[in-house]
Image (cartoon, helix red, strand yellow):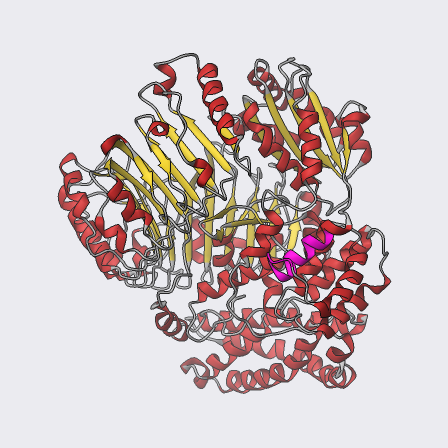
Amino acid sequence: MGRTEGGGSCDPPSLAHQEARLEGSSLGMPSEVVSVTTGVLNPLIGKLTKLLSSDECKKLSLVREQASFLKDELSAIKPLLDKMELTDKIDASARNWRDRVREMSYNMENCVDHFMHSTDGAADAETGFVENILELKVLSAEASARMREMHNLLDDDGISNSSHAHVVVVDSSPISAIYNKDLVGLDGPREELVGWLTDPQPKLKVVSIVGSAGSGKTTLAMQVYDEIEAQFDRTTFVSASRRPDVESLLGGLLLNLGTLEFPRTLELHEIIDRLREDLKDKRYLILIDDLWDQSAWNIMRCAFPENRNGSRMIVTTRLDDVAVNACHNDHACIYIMKHLEEQDSRRLFFNRVFGSNNVCPPQFQYISAEILKKCGGLPLAIITIAGILASTEARSLNEWESIKNVLGAMSATKPTLEEMMGILNLSYMHLPVYLRPCLLYLAMYPEDREIWRDDLVKQWIAEGFICSMSGVDLYDVAESYFNDLINRSLIQPEITEYGEVLSCRLHGMVLDLILSKCIEDNFISVAHNYDDMERLNTFEHKIRRLSLKSCAESETVSTSMSQVRSCALFGLSRYTPPLSDFKYLQMLMFNFPFGWEWDAAVDLTAIAHLFLLRYLKVLALSARVALPTEIKGLVHLETLELDCHLTKSFPSDITHLVNLLHLILPDDAMLPKGIQNMKSVRTLHCSVMSEGSLEDIKGLSELTNLKELELSTPYGQCLTVEGVDTLISSIGLVQDLKHLMLDCVIECDGYERLSDSLSDPPPCLEYLDLETWKFSRVPRWIGELSHLRFLHLFVLHLSNDELCVLGELPSLMSAMLHVSEVCENKVVVGTGLFPVLEVFWFRSNEDVNAYLSFEAGAMPNLQKLELGFGWKEWRGATPVGMECLPCLRDIHVWLRDTILESSKHEKEVRADVESAFKCTVRRYPKRPSVTVD
């Protein structure tokens, strides 16, 4: 949940270590970015330079001669390919030549890698060099003519495109203007739909929201869903997408609604029966987003019973006939999306380009009006064009004029689908070259998938997409790429916490653009079924990156995998390409949804032969994974992340992987013996126990590159007092730690030592989760953490003085406090405390509402307040002074089982609490939403 790398003002100490590590590796990270157009030509030039200086090459005159020639030829071709990267107006012959160079660069890199890895003579590698160079000589002869022909390509195209990377932070002002709950132009539609869905009609009602791509259907539907979900017993939502698998969709709904059943073991009719049984006596709210298939809906609707409890469903779709069918031909239940009025269009546009001040400089006013005319009130068109104009590459009036001219041929009323794709393509063409492969890489993920920033950052680095910058940590650079794509509105923020966007999604039309570019440049090959895989066999170019999504269980595929560099597998498929077929694989990801492959086996023993592997992630919570007994041959592995069950103990030779940066192990995997040898590790998640592992716990102190540490104890185990002391001592010596979570059970005597523990904490800590460590009081040393942005703490006793220690933290944006007993029977959040806090989560065994109060000027930025209490009956009060929280939007109240058991019926208690809070907030200007669970 936390921020894993980058940020803060502490200087990254790992940069020198990283650079030294890469320089010392013959097959290390490329020094120049992998380009979409050129493939790996830039890194290939770097590898050839290293090859020429190697001892192996000096012994082989033919290899040395040809490698030198090859390096010179590639360096001559590179400027032309760099120009071609900046335009999509290339004739067929030039495109064909470019594609041949790109594919040659991949093949030549494989040849160099094979040579450098060879340990038993280089005769085969020599032959490979000579054969490939013969073809390259033909290509280089064509290059001279192409250079003269395309010399003025960039000037003629008129696109200004920077090739220099720079660190970017998320531009929070315009982002909040677009994605917060006060989205422009949605107040009226939201209230209208809320009225439709909250009428007293007892029978099931289905409301359809229909509109063109980019009109804001999903955003409106989620706004309505968020506002009314507290009124229902069961709520959930699911995205149907263009390739709906009804069994998977309904099984996912069954899981989301809280069943403990594993839907993969059920047939479709059994899933429908279980859903009907679960919902028959409930008032439910279901949102089905992006429905394309009428036949799929005809099956899905069978799962939702007509129970006359006032249940409601929301369906969004682009298709009129699907909208009509979904709401049973009741046209009164169809909401047709309207495009934004001129005033709302300006507000959205100016907020995005000029920030929350919403002020357009005089010199841009006329041209802004002309550009907005071409957007036709379509939100996606507006934020896409605004994303271009808000970027650092488009600050002058001339650049605005250029963009207006490109839009000149478009309709001035409402962009067609083709014109909308043209706008998105314009945004892509204005991307700096180094951002393009990062954006296209998102095609590896399925449609409508939530994509985590930290996964992308690690994958981009493993792929070689990130440009190194002097004095800046590589992970900070990668995060800035992510931020830049957010600011340009090409990816949509999904989860935002403590000031950062942690995950994102792709709009369907952006995904369409990305997929078309991937096909055009042979960047990523996507297969959903057997026919797709067979189709890939017919392509002229070899598969370089493969995303395999939901192939049938019994199918086998004959596609050659030998040239695949990256492979991601998602969904229900039991088909896994034999890892022995891969030779040059660098990135491998398995992602199986929870419950769908219960007790399935994933055999990864063959990864030991993938000598170039840099990234491996397995997300298969209900599967058993077999690893090889030895993995020390994976000398380039940088990320190893296993969220699964292992069939046997973890390979003990992992400590030989000196380049490993991220090690995330299953809950039952212990701290590796000899962990102190893994000097490069910056992320470590595993279990720890005292017996026989004190030396390894002590070894954590030697991991000077460590930024993120998460430790837990196995079920039924605990840390001894000696283990606690050793762990605390080790953590105190890791001075550059930014993220710390300790989910460790401790012997009873150990809790008495915790208040004074970590008296000298790592000064750069930004994320601290110590929920399972029961402190008697708030430790004073927490007040020294000036960079801390997230805190989760359990204290037995809390006083107002101790709350002030937390409230004076200057960077704290999210605080979660679990308190057993409150001293003086009151908690007063005083004026000026928690100046940047956005989320406050406060739980107690007592009725927290009776003694919690806020003074004017406290928590001025608080947006979400979560309160939880139990053990005793609710006293009927709400916290005093909530009206003093000017930015409060959401109040969430959690009733623990104990209070329900000791008082009235659950529904009555919930209704009383909800009524009291809603009555209280009704007087507030912003009317925050109230949810009781």
Q: Nearer the viewer, residue 809 or 1?
A: 809
Q: Residue at x 47, y 75 (%)?
A: 122
In the image, is residue 356 part of the stretch drawn in magenta?
Answer: yes
**Vertical position of residue 223 compared to residue 516: above or below:** above
In the image, is residue 644 part of the stretch drawn in magenta?
Answer: no
Q: Which residues are magenta?
A: 345-358
Q: Is residue 633 left or right of residue 618?
A: left
Q: Position of residue 86 (x, y in %)?
A: 70, 72
Q: Position of residue 205 (x, y in %)?
A: 70, 21
**Vertical position of residue 186 compared to residue 27: above or below:** above
Q: Nearer the viewer, residue 195 or 164?
A: 195
**Residue 838 in view, yes or no:** yes
Q: Is residue 791 left or right of residue 126?
A: left
Q: Is residue 637 left or right of residue 125?
A: left
**Vertical position of residue 752 compared to residue 70: above or below:** above
Q: Position of residue 668 (x, y in %)?
A: 32, 40
Residue 849 in which image quadrant: top left
Residue 150 in which image quadrant: bottom right
Q: Nearer the viewer, residue 28 or 818?
A: 818
Q: Is residue 331 left or right of residue 263?
A: right
Q: Residue at x 63, y 53 (%)?
A: 443
